[in-house]
C-alpha cells in the first residue's frame, strides 16, 4: 500500500531541491558579476557536479568593436591548459609501451644538447628539466608574430645555458612542453596537431576543439583583448605555431567538461597512470612539489583536487576539479586583464558548500569583544602578525617591507575576514590561557601568542593628479608579463598581466606601497626628468620594470 502523502512528499522534495538550486545559482551569479560586466571583455563559465552541468554562464563581450555578446558556445585559446592534453598524450604513449618516463630525451631527439646532463621525459613533464624557457627569452611580443616550424622553435632555445641541473629545482617551463610535443611526433609518426585531434578530440566528441590556427574560420571564436593605461586594446598578435604543445589548443567550456569526465572515468589512460599526473612529484632531494604532469595539486578549504591555469595574449583560463565532491569548474576569458582564477576558486568554494564569506556576512561586534584578540602572533611559516584596535576597528598587520595594515571584519565573536573574503582569522584561547590565531587561506596556518612590540605602520600621503599621471603607462617585469599603471584623480593603480587591479599608496613622491599584498614600488626618472622604470620590492627581492609604453 502506497503512503497517502507520497505525491505531496515528492512535491515538497522537488520544491526544496529547486529552491536550493536557485539559491546556488544566485550565489554563482553574484560571484561572476563582481568580476565581469556586460560592456567589457567577458568569460564563459561552466560548473559541473557528478559530471553534469549545474551552471553555464556567458558574460561580457566576445567582440567589443562589433558589440557582440558572449555566448556559452564561444571558442577560446586554452593557453597553458593545453599542457594537460600534452601530458595525457605522453602517458597514453607510455601505456602503449612506446616510452618510459625515465627515458632520456636524447632517445627521441638525439641531437638535443643536454650539456652533459641526463634530462628525462619526467623532467619535461613536471618542469624540473633546467632547460631555459623560451617565453622568458628576448622580446616575446616580437618573436610571437612570426611562424616557426616545430624544429625552428626548438632551435630558438636549445643552445641556451641551463638554469639548473635536472631535478634540482622547479621552474615553470614552456620549452619542456614543446619538446614533449616533438616526442609525440617522433613516436606517433604524425604531427602533434593530428595526434591530439584524432586520438583525443575525436575520441571524446570534442567537436568544438582544435589546434589553434590564425587563418581558418572558426565558428564562435572570440577576439582577444588586453588593457593598457587608456583602456581595452586588441591583444598582441601571436602565431599559434609558437605556443605549440605548451599552449596552442582551443576549446569551449562544454568540450572541457567532456575532457574532465574522460579524465575522471579513465577513458584514455588508467587510474594508476593518471594518478602520476595529479599527485605532484619530487625533486632529487625528496622535496615534494605540487606540480605533477600538466596538472597541479590544490587544496580548497580542505577539499583536495587538481588545477591548471593559462595566460596568453588576450586570454586567461582556469580549471579546477575537486575529487571527493566531484565538482568541476572551468572559466575561459578573452582578456588577459582579469583574474579568472579568482572567479573559479570562489565558484568552486560555493559549489561545495564552503563559500568564501562576503561583506554581507559581517556582523556588528562590540569593541570589548574585539579587544580580546589584540596582540602579536607568530605563525608556523615564520610570519609575525599583529592584531590591534584603531578608531574602534580591529586591524591586522604582518611584519614586512611595507607593514601594511588591513581592517578585519567580524563574522562571529572569534572569526574575522579580510575585505575580499578569501582570507580569514579564527581566534581561540588555549588551556594554558594563551591565545591562538589560525590564518585561513586554502590551508590553515596556526599562530601562537608572543610578546613582541608592534612596528610602526607605513604612512601614506596624498599626491596631486599632476604628480601621479607621470607614472601612468605599461612597465615590463618579464617577457609577456607587464604591469599597467593607471591614474584616476588622486588615486593610482597597478594591474599585472592576468591579475586584478589594485591601488597603491604614496609614501613620498616616488615611492608607493600596496595594501592588498606586501610590496613596494619606487619610480625612477632619466636625466630628462621622464619616468623610465620602477623597482619592485617584494619578498626580499628587487625587480626592475622598464616603462615600455
Image: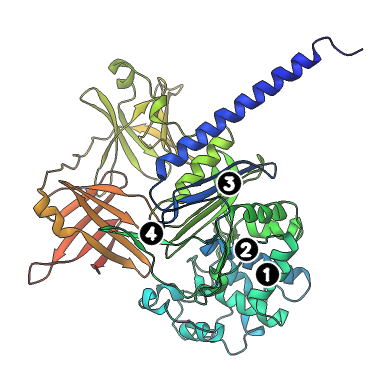
- Farthest front residue in view: 66
Mark 3 closeness class: few <14, some 14–19, many ≥20 residues within 10 Å: many
Q: How many marks?
A: 4
Secondary structure beneath label 3: strand
Badge 3 or badge 2: first in the primary sequence:
3
Q: CA distance from mark 1 to mark 2?
A: 8 Å
Horizontal and vertical percent position of residue 332: 51, 54
Q: Are marks 3 and 4 in contact (CB under 8 Å)?
A: no
Q: Which residue is mark 1?
A: 197
- Residue at left offset 55%, top offset 41%: 348
Q: CA distance from mark 3 to mark 4?
A: 26 Å
Q: Which residue is mark 2?
A: 209
Badge 1 or badge 2: first in the primary sequence:
1
Q: Are marks 3 and 2 in contact (CB under 8 Å)?
A: no
Q: Which residue is mark 3?
A: 46
Viewer-side residue, 388 vs 352? 352
Badge 3 or badge 1: first in the primary sequence:
3
Horizontal and vertical percent position of residue 460: 15, 43
Q: Which residue is mark 4?
A: 65
Secondary structure beneath label 2: loop
Badge 4 or badge 2: first in the primary sequence:
4
Secondary structure beneath label 4: loop
Color scheme of the displayed model: rainbow
Mark 1 closeness class: few <14, some 14–19, many ≥20 residues within 10 Å: some
- Asked if 478 appears above or below 465 in the picture, the reply is below
Amino acid at each position: 500500500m502506497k503512503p497517502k502523502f507520497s505525491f505531496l512528499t515528492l512535491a515538497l522534495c522537488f520544491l526544496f531541491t529547486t529552491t536550493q538550486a536557485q539559491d546556488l545559482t544566485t550565489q554563482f551569479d553574484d560571484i561572476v558579476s563582481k568580476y565581469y560586466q556586460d560592456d567589457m571583455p567577458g568569460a564563459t563559465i561552466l560548473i559541473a557536479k557528478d559530471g553534469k552541468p549545474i551552471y553555464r554562464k556567458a558574460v561580457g563581450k566576445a567582440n567589443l568593436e562589433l558589440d557582440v555578446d558572449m555566448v556559452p558556445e564561444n571558442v577560446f585559446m586554452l593557453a597553458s591548459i593545453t599542457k594537460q592534453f600534452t601530458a595525457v598524450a605522453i602517458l597514453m604513449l607510455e601505456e602503449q609501451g612506446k616510452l618510459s618516463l625515465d627515458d632520456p630525451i636524447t632517445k627521441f631527439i638525439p641531437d638535443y644538447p643536454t650539456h652533459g646532463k641526463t634530462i628525462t621525459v619526467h623532467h619535461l613533464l613536471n618542469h624540473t628539466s633546467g632547460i631555459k624557457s623560451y617565453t622568458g627569452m628576448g622580446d616575446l611580443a616580437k618573436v610571437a608574430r612570426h611562424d616557426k616550424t616545430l624544429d625552428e622553435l626548438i632551435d630558438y632555445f636549445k643552445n641556451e645555458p641551463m638554469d639548473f641541473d635536472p631535478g634540482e629545482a622547479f621552474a615553470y617551463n614552456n620549452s619542456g612542453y614543446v619538446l614533449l610535443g616533438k616526442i609525440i611526433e617522433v613516436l606517433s609518426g604524425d604531427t602533434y596537431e593530428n595526434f591530439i585531434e584524432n586520438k583525443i578530440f575525436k575520441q571524446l566528441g570534442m567537436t568544438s576543439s582544435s589546434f589553434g590556427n590564425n587563418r581558418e574560420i572558426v565558428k564562435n571564436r572570440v577576439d582577444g583583448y588586453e588593457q593598457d593605461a587608456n583602456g581595452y586594446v586588441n591583444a598582441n598578435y601571436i602565431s599559434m605555431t609558437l605556443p605549440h604543445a605548451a599552449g596552442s589548443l582551443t576549446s569551449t567550456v562544454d568540450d572541457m567538461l567532456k575532457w574532465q569526465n574522460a579524465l575522471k572515468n579513465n577513458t584514455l589512460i588508467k587510474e594508476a597512470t593518471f594518478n602520476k599526473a595529479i599527485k605532484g612529484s619530487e625533486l632529487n632531494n625528496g622535496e615534494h612539489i605540487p606540480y605533477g604532469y600538466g596538472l597541479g595539486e590544490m587544496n580548497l578549504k580542505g577539499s583536495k583536487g587538481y588545477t591548471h591555469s593559462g595566460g596568453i595574449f588576450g586570454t586567461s583560463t582556469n580549471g579546477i576539479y575537486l575529487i571527493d565532491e566531484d565538482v568541476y569548474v572551468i572559466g575561459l576569458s578573452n582578456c588577459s586583464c582579469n583574474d579568472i582564477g579568482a572567479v573559479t576558486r570562489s565558484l568552486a568554494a560555493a559549489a561545495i558548500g564552503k563559500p568564501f564569506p562576503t561583506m554581507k556576512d559581517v556582523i556588528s561586534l562590540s569593541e570589548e569583544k574585539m579587544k580580546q584578540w589584540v596582540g602579536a602572533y607568530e605563525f608556523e611559516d615564520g610570519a609575525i602578525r599583529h592584531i590591534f584596535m584603531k578608531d574602534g576597528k580591529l586591524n591586522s598587520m604582518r611584519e614586512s617591507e611595507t607593514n601594511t595594515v588591513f581592517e578585519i571584519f567580524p563574522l562571529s565573536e572569534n572569526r574575522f575576514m579580510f575585505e575580499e573574503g578569501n582570507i580569514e582569522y579564527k581566534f581561540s584561547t588555549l588551556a594554558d590561557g594563551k591565545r591562538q590565531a589560525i590564518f585561513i587561506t586554502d590551508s590553515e596556518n596556526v599562530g601562537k601568542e608572543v610578546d613582541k612590540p608592534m612596528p610602526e605602520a607605513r604612512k601614506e600621503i596624498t599626491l596631486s593628479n599632476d604628480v601621479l599621471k607621470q607614472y601612468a603607462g605599461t612597465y615590463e617585469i618579464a617577457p609577456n608579463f607587464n604591469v599597467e599603471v593607471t591614474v584616476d584623480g588622486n588615486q593610482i593603480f597597478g594591474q599585472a598581466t592576468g591579475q586584478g587591479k589594485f591601488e597603491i599608496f604614496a609614501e613620498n613622491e616616488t615611492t608607493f606601497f600596496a595594501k592588498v599584498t606586501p610590496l613596494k614600488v619606487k619610480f625612477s626618472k632619466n636625466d630628462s626628468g621622464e619616468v623610465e622604470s620602477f623597482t619592485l620590492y617584494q619578498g626580499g627581492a628587487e625587480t626592475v620594470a622598464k616603462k615600455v609604453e
